[in-house]
Amino acid sequence: MNRTPLMAIVAGILAFFLLLSGPAAAQVSLSEGYAKTVESLDAKLPNLPEPKASPRAGSEIWFNATAFNDRFFTYAFQQRLGAAIDWFWVFGAKYRADIFQRWGGIPDPDCCVPGDPNCPAKSLDETYGFQWCPGDGQLLQFVGKLGYKDPACDLKDSASAAANQAQNACDLHFGTSTGVLGLRKFPNPRFNAEKWKALNGSLGSWDCFRGKGDAEGKCNGKAAAKHFFDGAVEPPFRIGMACGACHIGYKPDNPPADPDKPAWDNIDGLVGNQYSRISNLLGSGFTPHDLEWQLIARARPGIVDTSALPMDFVSNPGTMNAIINFARRPLHEHNILKWRKAASCEANSAPDACWCEPGKQGKCWQRGTQKELVQNILKGGEDSIGLREAIQRVYFNIGSCSEQCWLNHLPDVRAADPGQRNYGQSPFGVGQCRRDCAAFRAIEDRLPDLEAVFMTARPSDLWTARGITREQLEAQLDQEFFPGAVKRGREVFARQCASCHSSQPEPHDTADFHATDPNDPTLRLDWLGNDEVHPASEIGTFAGRSLHSNHMPSRVWEEYAALDLRERAPDPGRKEVMKGAGRGYYRNISLLSTWAHAPFMHNNAIGPEICGQTTVNEQGDLDFNENLYVTKDGTPLDGAPACRAFDASAEGRYRLYVDSMRDMLNPAKRIPKMHLLSHDVIIPVVPKIEDSKLAQALGVSLSIKFPKGKPALDVGSLRFKDLIQDMVLVLRGEQKFTAKYQALLDQGQRDELQAGLKRMHLELLKAAGKDYFEVNDEARAFIQKFYSTTLERVENNGHRFGESLSDQDKDALIAFVATL
Amino acid sequence: MRKLFLLLLLIAVAGGGYWFMFLRDQAPERPSADFADEKPATGLDPDNPTRELHVDFAELERTKPLTREERARLTPANLAGLSQEEVDQIYGRLSAGPIPDGYWDGGLFFPRGSGGKTRMGEIIGSVLGEIVNEKVQFAERIGHGLWQGKFFFKEQGVLRNAIQDLKLFEILIDDPTKVPKAEIPAKGWRSWISSTSDVWQLFPAKLHCGQSLLDGRRESVIIDYAYTDDVDGYQELPDSLAGRRGLRIRDEIRMVRPGFYLGRAYADRIFLLNFTLYDPAIAEAGMQGFLNGEDITEECWPGETGLAAAN
């Protein structure tokens, strides 16, 4: 037989199988536009030490790596944590126009709607209703099959990663874009096309999966039901989240002409997305009646409660920090117990003290305590053990390695037996995670790359955004406010603000707040903040964020907290019962590029409310744009200011900045803001039966109702498990009650608590035959006093510094800060 | 009357039930498995210094893996004598194994505290706790009597519960004539009368792999009653009682050894009770191979590290 045809056949078969299983392509290969934005990154940091890290690789990881959280957002989130996401509402091609307006998401410039001219996909069935994105030619072949080769496998690693003997890049898990930057999709090998079609009618439809029936509300002749919790129906994709989901935003100095249709030039991976509705997205499958909606999803644009998933029962959403000018961020000395690299471990070392990765010579880690100079990262500075560790912790916030290491340390909202596992948090072990989760190592080994890309980010200057010089900007501001406004504003700033908002030593009379590094004129020398921490009561702003508790001993992120920060004295100004172990502090923030980041404060509450303008609206959609303005009595304000439409343009940001500054400098004129319960929230103490006939027949029902119109924080910050436990302890008259509260309450408070619990018990007994126990005003006052993790309700109080300035000085300050 | 029947049936649907009614009183020997009582190396909870913390399953499995010999010595009877924390420590060191098929005998037991009382009785304490303890144990016995086991229809991804066919309960069923029936081997005193026993196949559930509510490190086989209105033979009453508009019952099981599964039943994610599933024929046929280290088929996600340490 002639060997040539045989070889050709063999080669053909090989080529066929190669085509079937890959070739994967790293993100720079998939997107020409993205590749251009990162091609010069490595050259920006020529002086990095050898072996060199790569900001380009860091950017690819930041934008795309999900580090194995696709299983978290497909299974654990729904089944274990009881949270529901309506992914199709976010990614469905028919909702493309509302990605930014509804979710604050940044549309991927490279994706297209199937059937549109030049779109490789011609029908929605091909893409299961999603947009088509680069890399989908490969990915879509593996929906319902094993064998997908992830694009991360082809990441071009840095010299630093190679020297670190980095974990296989495939474990970074890139997948392909969903159409929203930072949210990635993966083919679900368990998808069953026939089952999907039987439920939804076609491959491109998600209607019955989402509980959207026909005109009569039916699917296949039966009442439509949401299947978000139905593990028997596997969706075509698993969805993963990269850090970029919250941090990618529009460049303040080069925004898109149309925010619904950006180009890559308009996109910045580190600036932070102040329009993001990621909290709402994470709860998009709920109804407002659900407890979990109140716990996870109540937030205004640009803020997210990163402790909502770990369930610390402190409602504390905060802004995504703008990652800019980090090379000049102040360092602070802390006492830090953490893992550090080591050349070797002693024989028979306990793996929780020292561990070497098998098969990797000299790749060891040792745990110990040292004093170190590190940045204060979180808003209370409580997780300050190092920048790299802070970056790694972000991956836990987004669900990476959840099953391997930390899901078992999170409470189940409904576990009510205090002796039961999953009743409360416990600390997860970084060492265990490193050993048991390849994705952890894949990120950890490339942290120098991620740190390097952080170091490339620079402030956005208003003069650049306007295409003029700084001098010309100052002239414009003087014209807008009054002649000499900027100069006068500088004097006010030096006198009134710089003690917190400058990293230069006092006195500030002659300080140059705009100074740049002579070797790198894009790098500001002044961080415009000292990152010192202060009791939240001193700042006066809404304290919820300062009271979050995940960093405390026995809690989930215990290993990410500096020891000395956990030992801070409680703020004597706080009335909450639970306030120790380092809670109650805020870090001063940087004012770099403040003009671009309004509204203000850690919860974006000071300044106008902002909202998107959606175009594809359907019956039953959740309303994210509630009126948050209330009277002094806490009731909804008639004629409240309307929310301001998202405006990512430089002038839109600037106008928002000016109005937010006026709001901040005139606290007496602020209208209080408060999230109120828009619907009754009913918390079942015993499992609730929705069918009233069944419930009546069974005769077992006990629920607590929090009525509509009360502050949402009543529910979102309630330690309801302790409330239940204490009622039992008080009834038993056990010393355990005393032991629990001995160090927290004095005798008078304990007596008051016991008496109140006994009263509540009687009320509950009276309610036993009713559908629910409604929390009346008396019970509410008692419950909130002892069981709320945050007693404040008004969200836009505080930061009264500057209140006493004259109107002209306030204008001057607004003008000067706009130049920073 | 209807209320009482429904309550009894609710207990039955929640779990499992091969077993003689008073087997617990025969006090089987404790299994020889190694348990950990050490606590995590962390400080007290600043908000609640009395809060109990449990050893991490990953740490437990690293330091005290459950050997095949230990698993072989576990039985439905001796598991029922363990405290709930010990049962949890067994469950956390198991994997899902193959998804069962066919009929499996069931047994159930409520959580017990460290003192041997039911957890509910222990929490309430004092005289009232003693009364509750007795009530829970009574409910357990009723459950054993009513609920016989589970029929797995693996190919269809469906499961049905074997409920004792009692004329008395027909008033609880929309259309008793449409309830699928089956014969199972008779147990207990019934076996003195006949070798088989008639049961109803009620409370259908969907069968799939999914998240364990106790141990997220690997999947369990999930038996979910929430979305069953499209299953053939579904009857609104009583099947919806366990469904998404009812008590939202969800079971999960992991394999102890061939022919023997340990399960947990939840109502709206609140843990209710433990149950066992047992197939004596598979157990007998598979024991030697299991002890010889034969591979275990894993049909669900076995986690990143699997059970390598224990095998």
Image (cartoon, helix red, strand yellow):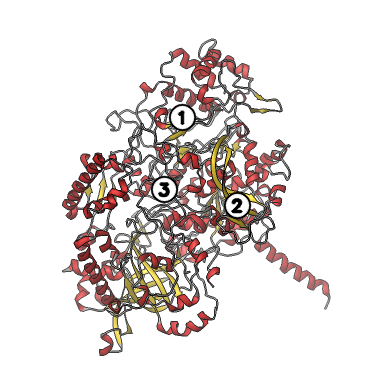
Q: Is residue A432 left or right of residue A614?
A: right
Three-letter amino acid code at the position of disc 2: Gln
Q: Which residue is mark 1?
A: A600
Q: CA distance from mark 1 to mark 2?
A: 41 Å
- Classify 10 Å Cα crowding around label 1: few (below 14), some (14-19), many (20 and above): many
Q: Chain of mark 1?
A: A
- The residue pinned by badge 2 equals A366
Q: Nearer the viewer, residue A669 or A129?
A: A669
The chain to which mark 2 is attached is A
Q: Secondary structure at mark 2?
A: strand
Numbered disc in front, either 2 or 3: 2
Screen quadrant of the C terminus of chain A: top right
Label 3: state its secondary structure: loop
Which mark sits nearer the N-terminus, 1 or 3? 3
Q: Position of residue A494 (x, y in %)?
A: 53, 18
Q: Residues within 10 Å of mark 2 (few under 14, many from 20)?
A: many
Q: Which residue is mark 3?
A: A283
Looking at the image, which is closer to me, A571 or A88?
A: A571
A540 or A229: nearer the viewer: A540
Callout 2 touching callout 3 (CB < 8 Å)? no
Q: Secondary structure at mark 1?
A: loop
Q: Is residue A130 left or right of residue B191?
A: right
Q: Nearer the viewer, mark 1 or mark 2?
A: 2
Sequence-wise, the earlier of marks 2 and 3 is 3
Location of residue B210 by image quarter:
bottom left
Q: CA distance from mark 1 to mark 3?
A: 24 Å
Residue type marked 3: Gly
Co-location on one chain, circles 1 and 3 = yes
Please give left or right for residue A815 compared with residue A213 in the image: right
Q: Chain of mark 3?
A: A
* Disc on the earlier residue, 1 or 2: 2
C-alpha separation, residue under disc 2 versus residue under disc 3: 39 Å
